[in-house]
Image: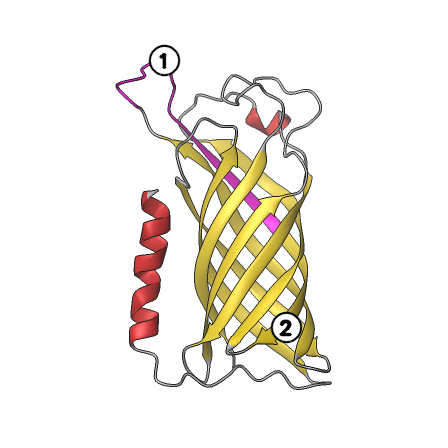
Amino acid sequence: MKIPSLLVILSLPLSIFAQDKSTIKLEEGKFFVYPELMLLASQIDGDNASGYNKLGFQLGVNTGLGLSNDKTISFQLALSQRGSRRSFNPDEPSMNAFHIIYNSLDMAVLYGKMLNSFYLQGGLRGTYLLSISESEGYVLNIANDYKQLGFILDTRANYPISDQFWLSATFQYSLMSLLNSSVSQVNYLQGGGGAFMNVLGVGIVWKP
């Protein structure tokens, strides 16, 4: 669980040096465009890895419309890297190390609502697999195992740290298995019955 702790530590300076804690303003009938950069810690459930051991990123642009009663509907296009990682454990030498790198183009639809000073969002994220690799050379032909399209549940909370920046935290989880119906190699997955992305993230949203 070292990576979740790292995410918390990285977010502390943003809160400490915040100058303006004003409420996020969502104007009815007004369009917005907000770029974002997030640091992601992920794992693939069932991979025998311990904790969120793969560090990745999400670079995206959010566009949306303010609705009545401090609500929004927004769309996001993003380039993301997720995956999973298991380091070599000398206490279990039969468990091979691996490092799965999953690059995708994401398209998300998010519904938002203000709650006190927090801007909460939830929705569906579609992923189009651009490339996948396993850098330790343990999982051969990994690209044949994974589906091109995926769907992820995305929930997030945003908090203003200045007039132009929000601190954002996200939790994402796959709604369907990442694997094809028949896979060439399943011995790195528990039982080989499925694989689901499990992601924590923290980052910055820029409000121009």
Residue 173 to residue 7: above or below: above
- Report if residue 71 lies within the magenta region: no
The image quadrant of residue 10 is bottom left
Estimate the x, y position of residue 125 in percent, counting from the top left: 66, 53
Magenta stretch, residue numbers: 89-105
Estimate the x, y position of residue 59 in percent, counting from the top left: 51, 59
Tag in front: 1 or 2 = 2
Report the front residue among 140 and 154: 154
The image quadrant of residue 52 is top left
The residue depicted at 68 percent of the width and 74 percent of the height is: 72
Estimate the x, y position of residue 47 in percent, counting from the top left: 49, 28
Residue type pointed to by label 1: Ser
Q: Secondary structure at mark 1?
A: loop
CA gap between label 1 and label 2 equals 49 Å
Density class for disc 1 (Cα within 10 Å; few <14, some 14-19, many ≥20) is: few
Locate residue 46 relative to residue 51 in the image: left or right: right
Q: Which residue is mark 1?
A: 94
Q: Secondary structure at mark 2?
A: strand
Q: Which residue is mark 2?
A: 113
Residue 48 to residue 83: above or below: above
Residue type pointed to by label 2: Lys
If you read the primary sequence from the N terminus, does the residue marked by circle 1 or circle 2 appear first? 1
User: Which mark is on residue 157?
Assistant: none
The residue depicted at 53 percent of the width and 78 percent of the height is: 116
Locate residue 18 relative to residue 130 in the image: left or right: left
